[in-house]
């Protein structure tokens, strides 16, 4: 797929990964709709996109708001003319014992990582079906195939995204609408709390720079790949978890013990 002049809607645009994806797409000649909650960050990114020779429109929205997905699609079509590609990148993460995670935070994570993503996909789907073309990109995680201790709710949301992408791809099998699912391992972004970074360092788990991951995402889009898993040995363990989960359980016992010392207990 040639990305020049493609009109691309990118959620989570101002995060560490989203920013790098936006800048790479701009260099490819794409026309971007940058979605986020912070207008100042969006405008700053728009300037960087334009300095890179691209074009971008800022779309300030809180996807948690009722009706936000439908409104965003209408707003994006007004700004861009139409949408060729939707990249669902927005997400939130917690490293916490489940018993310490509040009901409100669980609801927020599920809504941001799953519900908004599905609703936004549904909102643009009729246009893609009418034109019999378009492409969806879902940024998932290795944790969408490998349940990891102290990331229970996050893992649940990413398993959901993985399953949704597979089901949607099969639902659209007789169309020319593409679906790409990308599963990175840890990424070095501000999304990670300092205790998470410290844990990965002590455990020896490598994390990737966001520009590297962004490059692989854009390449997967250009090649119209169905799925891309990034990083070893994490990708191998994700595969192994699907065929021999008891072996992974044994391997993660040590990781569970190591992770415990980095957990931050909430204040009483």
Image (spheres, helix red, strand yellow):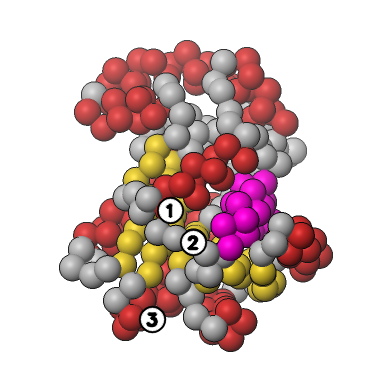
Camera-nearest label, 3 or 1: 1
Is any part of residue 38 visible from this angle?
A: no
Residues at marks 3 and 1, CA–CA distance in whole angstroms? 20 Å
Q: Nearer the viewer, residue 248 or 253?
A: 248
First of labels 2, 1 by sequence position:
2
Q: In this rendering, is residue 225 above or below 255?
A: below
First of labels 3, 1 by sequence position:
3
Is any part of residue 243 visible from this angle?
A: yes
Residues at marks 2 and 3, CA–CA distance in whole angstroms? 19 Å
Residue range highlighted in magenta: 11-29
Residue 221 got which mark? 1
Residues at marks 2 and 1, CA–CA distance in whole angstroms? 9 Å
**Mark 2 Cα-neighbour bin, 10 Å: few <14, some 14–19, many ≥20:** some
Q: In this rendering, is residue 233 above or below 112?
A: above
Q: Residue at x 67, y 46 (%)?
A: 16
Q: Residue at x 29, y 76 (%)?
A: 132
Q: Nearer the viewer, residue 257 or 221?
A: 221
For the residue labelled by badge 1, is the local secondary structure a helix, a strand or a loop? helix
Q: Which residue is mark 3?
A: 127
**Mark 1 Cα-neighbour bin, 10 Å: few <14, some 14–19, many ≥20:** many
Asked whether disc 3 touches disc 1, contact meaning CB atoms under 8 Å apart, the reply is no
Q: Is residue 22 magenta?
A: yes
Q: Residue at x 34, y 49 (%)?
A: 225
For the residue labelled by badge 2, is the local secondary structure a helix, a strand or a loop? loop
Residue 31 location, x and y as percent?
59, 69
Majority secondary structure in the magenta region: helix
Residue 82 location, x and y as percent?
50, 80
For the residue labelled by badge 3, is the local secondary structure a helix, a strand or a loop? helix
Q: How many numbered discs, if any?
A: 3
Does 236 sit left or right of 85 as displayed?
left
């Amino acid at each position: 797929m040639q990305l020049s002049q493609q009109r691309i809607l990118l959620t989570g645009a101002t995060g560490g990964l989203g920013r790098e994806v936006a800048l790479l797409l701009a260099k490819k000649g794409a026309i971007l709709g940058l979605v986020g909650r912070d207008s100042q960050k969006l405008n700053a990114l728009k300037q960087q996109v334009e300095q890179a020779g691209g074009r971008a429109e800022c779309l300030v929205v809180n996807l948690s708001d009722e009706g936000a997905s439908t409104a965003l699609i209408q707003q994006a079509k007004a700004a861009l003319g139409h949408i060729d590609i939707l990249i669902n990148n927005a997400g939130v993460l917690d490293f916490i014992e489940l018993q310490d995670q509040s009901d409100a935070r669980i609801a927020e994570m599920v809504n941001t990582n799953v519900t908004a993503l599905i609703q936004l996909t549904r909102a643009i789907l009729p246009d893609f079906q009418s034109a019999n073309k378009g492409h969806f990109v879902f940024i998932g995680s290795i944790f969408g195939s490998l349940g990891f201790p102290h990331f229970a709710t996050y893992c649940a949301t990413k398993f959901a995204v993985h399953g949704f992408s597979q089901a949607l791809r099969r639902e659209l099998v007789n169309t020319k609408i593409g679906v790409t699912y990308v599963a990175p391992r840890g990424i070095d972004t501000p999304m990670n709390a300092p205790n998470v970074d410290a844990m990965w360092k002590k455990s020896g788990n490598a994390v990737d720079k966001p520009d590297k991951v962004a490059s692989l995402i854009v390449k997967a889009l250009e090649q119209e790949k169905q799925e891309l898993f990034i990083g070893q040995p994490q990708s191998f363990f994700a595969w192994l978890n699907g065929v021999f989960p008891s072996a992974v359980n044994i391997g993660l016992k040590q990781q569970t013990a190591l992770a415990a010392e980095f957990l931050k207990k909430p204040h009483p």
